Image (cartoon, rainbow, N blue to C red):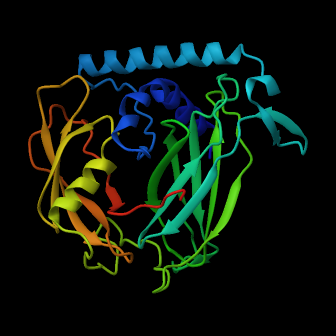
Amino acid sequence: MSVGRRRLFLVALGCLVLTGAAAAHRAQVPFVSEVAGRTPERDDPAVVRKLLEREQQAAYARLKAASKLKRTRAAGCVPVPDFRGGTLLGPPAPRVRARIIGHQVEVLYRFRQLPTSAACRPAGVGVVVNSNKSTASSGSLVPSIGYYLLAGPVGRFTLDLPWYAAPPYDLQVDSSTLLGIRSTYVKQRLACPQAGCLDGYSPPLHSSPMPQPVLPLTGLNRAQLEASLRYVTSRERWPSARSVSCSSVRSCTVTQITPGFPNWPYRVRYRIAGQQLTGCWMGLNQGTVDKLPYRDAGRGPVELAGCRSWLSWG
């Protein structure tokens, strides 16, 4: 990750790290959202700019407070490698379970114990899914990278297979504190489903079609799909999901609310397809149905993915 993106990630974590507990009760294992670095823009409505500026001020206050804390073993810090080949004290790494469900990867993480001190307590986890085999004529590879806000010691998320890539695929996960101190990496080779791994997404220029092959949905009905989609979107923010509904197992709608405009709901439609694993699905954003409260209001994730039955710790 570039230095600029890492800093933006940490500021976003500073803004959001205290909001996780409110939604953690919605499921035993929270589905955590990818951190999006939302910053004030000159053409944002005044109410949106004020909300974002307030969040940034609170974030920097937390970062400043954390910077004054000492990293000690008593604070829950553990030895981690530094860039000079030595070690320093930093956050613990999570335990990880992962599986390829089709076009996406499900990742389940758990920390044995989260340090009580912000000096060493992980605020988020970063993940990379990579491949050394390109399917692009140029030979380029686009790893799948995500940064996710912790909602407590356990959580799960989904992300794409790397674009323009072919199996085998490798997973790498680490944690980061508010100050950017990173844990050791957890690395593993991802096993393919019984039918074999799919290639990563390879969209043509200026187009974002459903990833090929488009798989049929199996193993869940419309009500089960709605329940899974509700769980997957339960922690989205900027905008957040007020409700979900599926007219069929091929099309669902998420009603969104963006901060600053609580009385202006708008719907985002998703086309639904299946995954390789029975009971798993993916959704591709087809755009908004209703007028947005302002031009740059969030339109929801481009892709969503989920399952009726998830990985567990047993």
Residue 214 coordinates in the image, percent (x, y) = 29, 78
Q: Which residue appears farthest toward the right when viewing the image? A: 86
Left or right? Give the position of 35 relative to 27.
right
**Whether residue 216 is situated above or below residue 258 in the rendered picture:** below
Residue depicted at 20% across the width and 56% down the height: 226
Res 26 → quadrant: top left
> What residue is shown at x 27% (from left), y 62% (from top)?
283
Which x, y percent locates residue 211?
34, 73
Q: Is residue 95 left or right of residue 284?
A: right
Taking the spot 77% from the left edge, 18% from the top edge, the residue there is 70
Task: Tell me, yes or no, if residue 152 can be seen here.
Answer: yes
**Outermost residue toward the front in this view:** 314
Q: Nearer the viewer, residue 223 or 100?
A: 223
Name which quarter of the figure residue 53 lies in. top left
Q: Count the labels in the image.
A: 0
Does any portion of residue 162 appear in the rendered image? no
As drawn, 224 above or below 155: below
Q: Position of residue 267 (x, y in %)?
A: 13, 45
Residue 44, compared with residue 217, is above or below; it is: above
Residue 88: image location, x then y, percent: 84, 34
Q: Tell me if 255 is positioned left or right of 13 in this view.
A: left
Residue closest to the eye, 293 or 161: 161
Foreground pick, 260 / 249: 249
Give the vertical position of 75 relative to 10 (above or below).
Answer: above
Q: Residue furthest bottom?
A: 195
Residue displayed at 67% across by 29% down:
115
